[in-house]
């Protein structure tokens, strides 16, 4: 099969492909999705096969309005309605009890369905033109960083899907926030651009963070609520280590500028030393840092260059989520063997950023303790 790439003028054609039971990768404000008719079990099977994804890992279903979500759930609570009207269209996925219309193939065998209404104009036009709810996991090969550009989708899925709708770079760059409303307490299953604090203020009550979000992985025999959490994710090919200091962690990064400068230098000194050792051992080394710290890193050793990549500004976490997955893919393309990355405050969108960095590093962290 030849995968064709079309710009946003290809929306109608893309909708025809979906209506015929085909697969179309589509842009959203979070990452590109791998779309197909969410009501067709055969299509769900094709999506899992195209991604190489285990079929117990359920798919998010995309709708173009809250009204379209109604027939897909068995009960639509007041709480769910409130969140939909406050955050949709936008990067919030709600897990709700499913109705009989949604096949178990789409929900990975669960009695709940994950629903989202994305924000992109092109995406909404596409869903409306299909006239169907669209199952859409991220359009990457399972385990690879999610795609934030059409060419990432092409790299991973060419020849396995009919079409890619190209609407440029995804603005947010990390996947949606997932909130489970199917139990007693609203539970955050995945952090994203809609923050826990925003959800709490809309709900007027606190939100529980699923333990699997905090640990980044799950122990043996534990069944996480978002089955996706048990699989390795977002991983570059290189070994990646996240670096922070005990002092920054303890103060939650709320430190005076002079202290911040000192801690930045300690982190950079550590990374520079480790980089030198790794380079001498014959490795190609990458460093993931931010605009504010870039100058602290040594760019090369002899004629060997260090692959330094900038996430954006740490004053603006969205500028960092926007670039993260593209940079992880670039490290792969550069055949980097080892990556050192800085840590950032986990407040607001920073929580989603750090969650993805932890997963990308396979939870490998270096915590620098106080000097003697
Ligand atoms: P992706 O589609 O790649 O963004 O991944 C979707 C994520 O949503 C995965 O981690 C799934 O496990 C999670 N998810 C989808 N449906 C449900 C559901 N019904 N209950 C809990 N988690 C879900
Ligand atoms: Mg995914």
Image (cartoon, grey):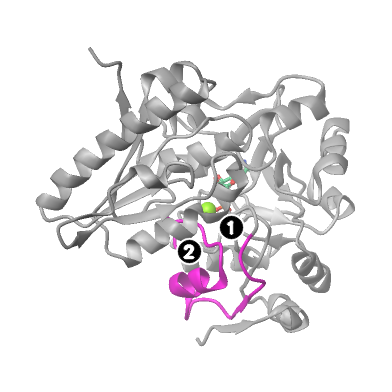
Residue range corresponding to the magenta coloring = 141-170
Q: Given the current orientation, which residue lies at the most extreme front position?
A: 258
Q: Quadrant of the C terminus?
A: top left
Q: Given the current orientation, which residue lies at the most extreme top position?
A: 372
Residue wearing tag 2: 51
Q: Assign a secondary structure to mark 1.
A: loop
Residue 169 covered by magenta stretch? yes
Q: x, y (%) of residue 201?
A: 79, 26
Q: Are marks 1 and 2 in contact (CB under 8 Å)?
A: yes
Q: x, y (%) of residue 33?
A: 61, 62
Q: Which quadrant holds residue 177?
A: top right
- Residue at the location (81% across, 70% down)? 125
- Residue at the location (56% across, 58% down)? 138
Which of 351/314 is in front? Answer: 314
Give the answer, above or below, for where 35 lies relative to 355.
Answer: below
Please give left or right for residue 215 compared with residue 364 in the image: right
Respond yes or no on whether mark 1 lies under 8 Å from ligand 1: yes
Q: Which mark is residue 137?
A: 1
- Residue at the location (84% across, 31% down)? 79
Q: Residues within 10 Å of mark 2 (few under 14, many from 20)?
A: many
Q: Residues within 10 Å of mark 1 (few under 14, many from 20)?
A: many
Which of 345/197 is in front? Answer: 345
Q: Assign a secondary structure to mark 2.
A: helix
């Amino acid at each position: 099969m030849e995968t064709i790439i079309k710009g946003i003028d290809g929306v109608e054609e893309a909708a025809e492909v979906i209506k015929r039971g085909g697969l179309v990768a589509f842009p959203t404000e979070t990452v590109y999705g791998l779309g197909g008719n969410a009501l067709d079990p055969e299509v769900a099977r094709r999506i899992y096969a195209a991604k190489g994804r285990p079929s117990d890992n359920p798919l998010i279903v995309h709708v173009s309005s809250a009204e379209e979500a109604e027939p897909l759930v068995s009960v639509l609570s007041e709480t769910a309605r409130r969140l939909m009207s406050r955050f949709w269209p936008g990067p919030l996925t709600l897990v709700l009890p499913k109705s009989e219309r949604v096949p178990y193939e789409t929900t990975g065998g669960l009695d709940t369905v994950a629903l989202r209404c994305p924000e992109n104009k092109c995406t909404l036009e596409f869903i409306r033109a299909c006239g169907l709810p669209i199952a859409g996991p991220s359009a990457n090969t399972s385990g690879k960083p999610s795609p934030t550009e059409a060419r990432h989708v092409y790299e991973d899925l060419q020849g396995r899907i009919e079409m890619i709708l190209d609407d440029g770079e995804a603005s947010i760059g990390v996947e949606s926030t997932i909130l489970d409303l199917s139990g007693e307490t609203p539970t955050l299953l995945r952090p994203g651009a809609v923050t826990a604090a925003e959800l709490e203020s809309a709900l007027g009550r606190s939100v529980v963070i699923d333990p699997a979000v905090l640990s980044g992985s799950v122990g043996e025999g534990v069944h996480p609520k978002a089955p996706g959490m048990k699989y390795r994710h977002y991983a570059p090919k290189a070994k990646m280590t996240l670096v922070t200091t005990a002092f920054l962690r303890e103060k939650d990064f709320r430190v005076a500028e002079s202290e911040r400068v000192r801690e930045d230098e300690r982190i950079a000194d550590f990374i520079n030393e480790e980089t030198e050792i790794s380079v001498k051992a014959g490795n190609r080394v990458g460093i993931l840092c931010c605009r504010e710290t870039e100058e602290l890193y040594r760019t090369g050793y002899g004629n060997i260059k260090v692959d330094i990549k900038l996430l954006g500004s740490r004053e603006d976490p969205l500028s960092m989520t926007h670039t993260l997955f593209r940079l992880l893919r670039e490290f792969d393309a550069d055949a980097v063997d080892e990556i050192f990355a800085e840590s950032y405050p986990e407040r607001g969108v920073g929580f989603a950023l750090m969650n993805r960095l932890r997963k990308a590093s396979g939870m490998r962290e270096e915590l620098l303790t106080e000097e003697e």
